[in-house]
Image (tube, coloured by chain):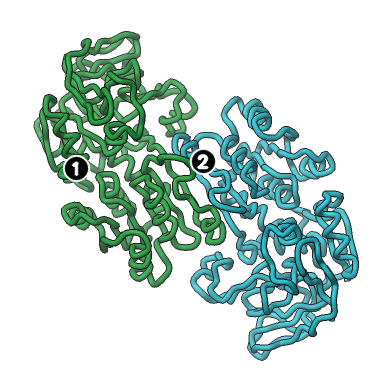
Chain colours: A green, B cyan
Amino acid sequence: MRATVIYGPNDIRVEQVPDAAVRTPTDAVVRVVLACICGSDLWAYRGVAKRQPGQRIGHEFLGVVEATGSGVTSVKVGDLVVAPFVWSDGVCDFCRAGLQTSCPHGGFWGEPGSDGGQGEAVRVPYADGTLVKLPAEAAGDERLLTAMLALSDVMSTGHHAALAARVRPGATVAVVGDGAVGLCGVLAARRLGAEQIIALGRHTDRTDIARAFGATDVVAERGDAAIAAVKELTKGQGAQAVLEAVGTEESMRTAISIARDGGAVGYVGVPHGGSAGVDIGQMFGRNVALGGGVAPARAYIPELLADVLDGTIDPSPVFDRSVSLEQVPDGYRAMDERTALKVRITF
Amino acid sequence: MRATVIYGPNDIRVEQVPDAAVRTPTDAVVRVVLACICGSDLWAYRGVAKRQPGQRIGHEFLGVVEATGSGVTSVKVGDLVVAPFVWSDGVCDFCRAGLQTSCPHGGFWGEPGSDGGQGEAVRVPYADGTLVKLPAEAAGDERLLTAMLALSDVMSTGHHAALAARVRPGATVAVVGDGAVGLCGVLAARRLGAEQIIALGRHTDRTDIARAFGATDVVAERGDAAIAAVKELTKGQGAQAVLEAVGTEESMRTAISIARDGGAVGYVGVPHGGSAGVDIGQMFGRNVALGGGVAPARAYIPELLADVLDGTIDPSPVFDRSVSLEQVPDGYRAMDERTALKVRITF
């Protein structure tokens, strides 16, 4: 089969690899229908996050079950399914508590020895714990499929940020970052009842999506000017809930600075190094809390899926370009150069 | 009147100072009956936290109202009252939300221009917002007075840590630090229904108090050995709620390390410098949240006072030495040398 392989910085290839196959009774094989490229894949593409040369890549996919191990009971051949961006056994203490990202048997698509999501098929470990069945009739609805693909990571991650930031009905919310996760964070905040949602971002094509997703205000400034602008929009007090969806020192510093005293920052941007902009002295005096991390998408997919199916939320606009599998290297380039927001891969 | 004044590192004196007096209609003057020395006063004593030479010091006191400004309505001359460790106006958005430490008119006892708690009397700004009336009949009960004095800071701060760490009924809790705040954190965690409470501390006289306050286990090790010991006591998973009551890099690192995935660290130890041991990379992957900060004692005193009065909690054992006002410099020395846990000042 064909799959995306990373060899090093800026070196993404689509190659012939061994066919995905059931290896243990709890495995399933999913034939991929839709996949995509994540902002976090760019950390590997840019060489900031290390990968072994020849490692698979991609952690968001949706497809049809092609084979199941003898122990798989929750999905069967022919089922349309979506996978969260980590697999998990579904039965351990953490899985049952809804923190599947801490499952001791869990793993991340593309890690050495596993298939990545950006390929024709994927061996799914712990299929019962990992996969979520989608309605078969969705198969012909491209917009709906695209919206459901967002559940594998960006929509679930935006929701995680909103929960960690303690978004409540009526809350004043700020979202740092206009990437796909930040935009989904806007959508998640609106879904949770936020009244004022301030989107921080410089790209009008993206902040236009933010407005469509429910942002009431847009702040295009950065750094101190952004902090001042958010204060101005919030009677000098800052936002009760701040979603940090970038993962740089500057974005974290901004997020903490624009949080209202007693408020919370929900961070889902992958931090790169040390304290990552966290100023504990500032947090202490103002009682600003910090929560979040890697999103347990598996826990959120059923709830968010229901809202996608009934039209309450539609995250599909975060995908602004489509490529074929063979064009995936072009997709990485486009996202790296910011000419695309989020690239969908069709099969 | 006589009051404690700090001139520099290790230079605490008791001197003649101008009498406390009502200056604005919202002031009251409280004649101090009991005060004490705080672990955080030692940061100033040791020169780590800067003070202007001649600044007053002390932020925990209980006493009798001696005079009130014309605008004060909630307390009257002769009332027995306790003060939280910051004053606040009681009417702003933050005060009404229970975050009096962020009151724009608030301040900290002993800051330049204000009286400190370690003196014969204190001018209390915003008396209506600040002071909490105590039952007059408590005046003759030394143990009860001492327990109520703990509400001004350490008991309220321990409670704040427990709330920030999200202690729930049945929870597994760890408390880093065997100072007065850590011990009060144990008491607060038990009060909130924690099932297992692991106290980390090396001083058996202190951990004995922790056990009396509800600790089910004591870990005397530090650093990696402490982390291993807590893991061992928690089936390898760590504590769901961790109270950090020290404020050093090592204690914060320990606190984050012993938190269970998905758990929270409630920190109230005053951080000294930068990231203060916060490893965001470790927090991210394990979804460990961090909350807390300076405790809004004013918000908690009424609730905790009720439990002190009915005997549900008794924090008085954290005071293990008493001095007169003139002996306050000896009290600082004793706490600095760790021959006293918390020193009470009687008048």
Mark 1 falls within which chain?
Answer: A
Q: Which mark is residue B252?
A: none
Q: Quadrant of residue B230?
A: top right
Which amino acid does the dot numbered 2 rest on? Asp
Q: Quadrant of residue B9?
A: bottom right
**Residue tagged 1:** A337
Q: What residue is at 83 percent from the left and 55 percent from the top? A: B319
Q: Nearer the viewer, residue B171 or A324?
A: A324
Label 1 in the same subunit as label 2: no
- Which class describes the residues within 10 Å of circle 1: few (<14), some (14-19), or many (20+)? few
- Which class describes the residues within 10 Å of circle 2: few (<14), some (14-19), or many (20+)? some
From what the image shows, is residue A35 above or below residue B275?
Answer: above
Q: Which mark is residue B279?
A: 2
Element assignment for label 1: loop
**Residue A73 screen position, x and y as percent:** 31, 16
Q: Nearer the viewer, residue B39 or B30?
A: B39
Q: What residue is at 20 percent from the left and 54 percent from the top? A: A203
Q: How many marks?
A: 2
**Residue B169 screen position, x and y as percent:** 60, 42
Q: Nearer the viewer, residue A226 or A10?
A: A10
Q: What residue is at 16 percent from the left and 45 percent from the top? A: A317
* Residue A306 visible from this viewpoint: yes
Q: Residue furthest bottom?
A: B70
Which amino acid does the dot numbered 1 rest on? Glu
Q: Quadrant of the N terminus of chain B?
A: bottom right
* Residue A152 visible from this viewpoint: no
Mark 2 falls within which chain?
Answer: B
Question: From the viewer's perspective, is A154 left or right of B115?
Answer: left
Q: Are marks 1 and 2 in contact (CB under 8 Å)?
A: no
Element assignment for label 2: loop
